[in-house]
Image: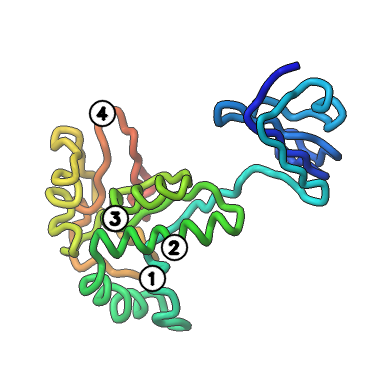
Amino acid sequence: MHTADLRIDAGWVVPIEPKGALRDHALIIDAGRIAAIMPIADADRAVAAREQIALRDHVLLPGLVNAHTHAAMSLFRGLADDIPLKVWLEQQIWPREGQFVTPDFVYDGARLAAAEMLRGGVTCCNDMYFFPDAGARAFVELGMRAMLGLPILDFPTAYAADAVRDYLVSKGVPKDKIETLGMGKTQPVPGVVCKQKNMKELIACYAPDRRVEVEVKGEGRR
């Protein structure tokens, strides 16, 4: 008989791959990883778990992934609704971001958003917002996985003052790893008109390994 840290018995286990639902199966977890999925009857004979949870009327499936979040903006919820995106950003959101957004604001907002996501079954998110180190601290503390991106804008904010030099270099991106590309005819955020004619300082990517790819929308290239 094998030992494990945790055994969860569920009425149905949906592994996603392969398709379908497994009736009356047990999920075996050891050292923080899924060690096995097997029928409950087999687990009774083969596994001695330090902790066992019975969810016989539940469906057990992998955590959901939220692929586009600005988690800290949970604190702006309900600020303004039912208006065009450009108006919402320029007249409602950006002025308040300039007034209120700090590392503490991002930390508190990310904690709130992470708690709500976890409650809804979301265990991983792809987040981009100011002060990502503060957001990362919140996600780590709540035990949530997150992919964090560095924001790049063509105007100064409380987070940074310049598209390349401050948004990237001062945040740890080496100067020799930055390559500016082209001019985009449309902007990364639909409906938002860039105040600069030249977008090349806004669109930046790593070189030469190209770990990060940024699409210059409207130009048909990356």
Amino acid type, residue under disc 1 in the picture = Leu
Observer able to see residue 123: yes
Which marked residue is nearer to the observer: mark 3 or mark 4? 4
Residue 139: image location, x then y, percent: 41, 49
Q: Are marks 3 and 2 in contact (CB under 8 Å)?
A: no
Disc 3 versus disc 1: distance between alpha carbons? 32 Å
Residue type (three-letter) at the residue carrying disc 4: Pro
Amino acid at pointer 3: Gly
Query: Which residue position is annotated with label 4?
Result: 208
Q: Which residue is mark 3?
A: 184
Where is residue 72? Give x, y as percent: 37, 62
The answer to whether residue 70 of the structure is visible from this angle is no
From the image, tell me which residue sits under label 2. 112
Per the image, label 1 sits on a secondary structure element best described as helix
Per the model, the C-alpha gap separating discs 2 and 1 is 8 Å
Residue wearing tag 1: 75
Q: Is residue 157 above or below residue 176?
A: below
Q: Whole-percent x and y of residue 183? A: 24, 53
Furthest-front residue in this view: 50
Per the image, label 2 sits on a secondary structure element best described as helix
- At mark 3, the secondary structure is loop
* Mark 2 residue type: Leu
Neighbor class of circle 1 (other Cα within 10 Å; few <14, some 14-19, many 20+) is: some
